[in-house]
Image (cartoon, rainbow, N blue to C red):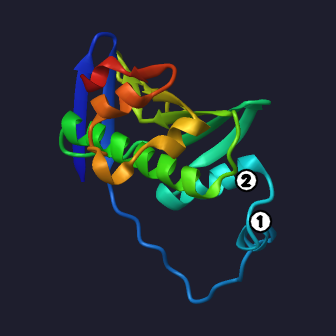
Amino acid sequence: MRKSTVVVGPFVAIALGASAVACGSGNPGPTTDQASQAQGPTTTVGAIEAAADKAVSNATASKQSKLLYIVKFKIKDNFTNGLIKAGIATNVFDMLKDISKSAPGGGYTIRFEGTFPMQDKYGKAITPDPVVFRATFMRSTAGRIQYDNIDTTSLDTLGDLADGAFYLHPAFD
């Protein structure tokens, strides 16, 4: 098991890498939620969640207000902070690309929030995993980006294209 620790100010970011193996002899079949998703999402939040989850597994979407949707995802650990940041950028660009293709257009805003395991300065795990990354985009911006012509691994590019707030926890600098 690989363990990486980053110490900055009062926080310590720590992540443990591990593999999981699923075992089972049969598939119980789709749940009601899975069956309804197979037919396609019928709401904007459903379309955003389906597109985000297609790009990054276990991404969730919720409607914060009439024009604001929140997409939460878990940031994957990597060998260096630079690779973690590249992974964040790649994940968000992938989600934006899928959202621009499948979610309905409109004047709404999407805020991406990435969570990552952290510890306080005493070594106590902060639970639940705190939000260490935030970026806000208008739906119209997602549709204007030429994803094949930009560096989708650059957090700086992501920050430049963000329409609103952009935050990365100092532990990743």
Q: Is residue 165 above or below residue 29?
A: above
Residue 150 screen position, x and y as percent:
29, 44
- Quadrant position of residue 9: top left
Identity, as a three-letter code, of the amino acid under mark 1: Asp
Looking at the image, which residue sits at the far bottom?
Answer: 25
Determine the residue positioned at 73% across, 47% down. Answer: 45
Task: Provide the residue designation for mark 1.
Answer: 33
Toward the viewer: 29 or 45? 45
Amino acid identity at mark 2: Gly
Which quarter of the rendered picture does the C terminus lie within?
top left
Does the residue at mark 1 contact the one at mark 2 (Cβ under 8 Å)?
no
Residue at 19% across, 44% down:
79
Residue with the mark numbered 2: 46
Element type at marker 2? helix
- Closer to us: mark 1 or mark 2? 2
Drawn side of residue 88 relative to residue 63, left or right: left
Q: Position of residue 139 (x, y in %)?
A: 60, 38
Residue 100, image x and y in percent? 56, 50
The answer to which of marks 1 and 2 sits earlier in the sequence is 1
Image vertical order of residue 36 relative to residue 94, above or below: below
Instruction: Answer left or right for 28 relative to 144.
Output: right
Report whether 7 appears left or right of 53. Answer: left
Helix, strand or loop at label 1? It is helix
Which residue shows up at 23% across the image and 38% down it? 4
Residue 56, placed above or below residue 172: below
Residue at 25%, 46% in the rendered image: 78
Residue count near mark 2 (Cα–Cα under 10 Å), binned few <14, some 14–19, many ≥20:
some
* Image coordinates for residue 102, horizontal then vertical, percent: 62, 58
- How much space separates mark 1 and mark 2, taking CA atoms? 11 Å
Q: Is residue 57 visible?
A: yes
The answer to whether residue 52 is visible is no
